Each structure stands twice: as structure tokens, then as C-alpha cells.
Image (spheres, helix red, strand yellow):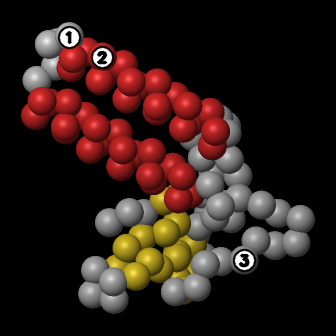
Amino acid sequence: DGGGEGGGDGGEDGAGQVLRALHGFETRREDWEAGALQSPYLWSLLHRDGAQLLHTLEALHLPPGWTRAWDVSSRGYYYAHPASGAAQWDPPAAKEGEEGEG
């Protein structure tokens, strides 16, 4: 399930989030090469942090309040706006002059 929420992370822009994640990945790789992290633990960190980064990136282009999640039975993403109860298969359009936060 790859849901994402519009709004980003604490006001940091998407490029900043990606750069921060890349720095973290590089630091963990260096720790692993130095023998400070075992491979299974490194893998679990990369899997968790990669999933969080994907979640953030998916949310960057959604209007505020919208989420995106994977529907296993349909093998496709659906979009939901929990506050209004709306759900749809097509990506929501931003209102004129409004872009996804982030």
C-alpha cells in the first residue's frame, strides 16, 4: 500500500527531502562498508526509509487533503479526500491557482 498525503513534510520542499534522504542513504552505506551495520539491518533501514521517501514524493503533486493508495484487487491507485469522503480512480485536479503543497 503506497498511500500518500498531500502537504509534504513540515514545509520542506521535495528537493530538500530527496537530498536529505540521499545523504542518509550514503551515510548508512558508509557505515555498512566500515562494518558498523550488518546487511540485514541495513536492508531493513533502506526498505523503511525508501518507502517513506516514496510516500513523500507521491504526495507532492496532490492537492491538500488528498491521499493516494494502491488497491490490490484492481491493481491500480485510487485517490481519496478523507475530510469530504470523496474517492475516485482519476487523480484529483487542483483548483485554479492551487498546487499541491510541498
Which numbered disc, 1 or 3, marks the residue that appears first in the sequence? 1
Residue 33 percent coordinates (x, y): 21, 17
Residue at image location 44% in from the left, 52% down from the top: 54
Side of 30 relative to 66 (left or right): left
Label 2 with label 1: CB-CB less than 8 Å? yes
Residue 63 percent coordinates (x, y): 68, 65
Specify the farthest residue to the front.
33
The type of residue carrying mark 2 is Glu
Q: Which residue is mark 1?
A: 34
Instruction: Examine the image and state in which quarter residue 69 appears.
Output: bottom left
Q: CA distance from mark 2 to mark 3?
A: 42 Å
Is disc 3 placed on a helix, strand or loop?
loop
Q: Which label number is shown at residue 30?
A: 2
Q: Which residue is mark 3?
A: 93
Is disc 2 placed on a helix, strand or loop?
helix
**Residue 3, placed above or below residue 39:** below
Label 2 with label 3: CB-CB less than 8 Å? no
Q: CA distance from mark 2 to mark 1?
A: 6 Å
Q: CA distance from mark 1 to mark 3?
A: 48 Å
Confirm whether residue 10 shows in the render.
no
The type of residue carrying mark 3 is Ala
Residue at image location 57% in from the left, 72% down from the top: 81
Residue at image location 58% in from the left, 85% down from the top: 90
Side of 25 relative to 42 (left or right): right
Label 1 with label 3: CB-CB less than 8 Å? no
**Residue 63, placed above or below residue 29:** below
Label 2: how many Cα within 10 Å (few below 14, some 14–19, many 20+): few
Confirm whether residue 48 shows in the render.
yes
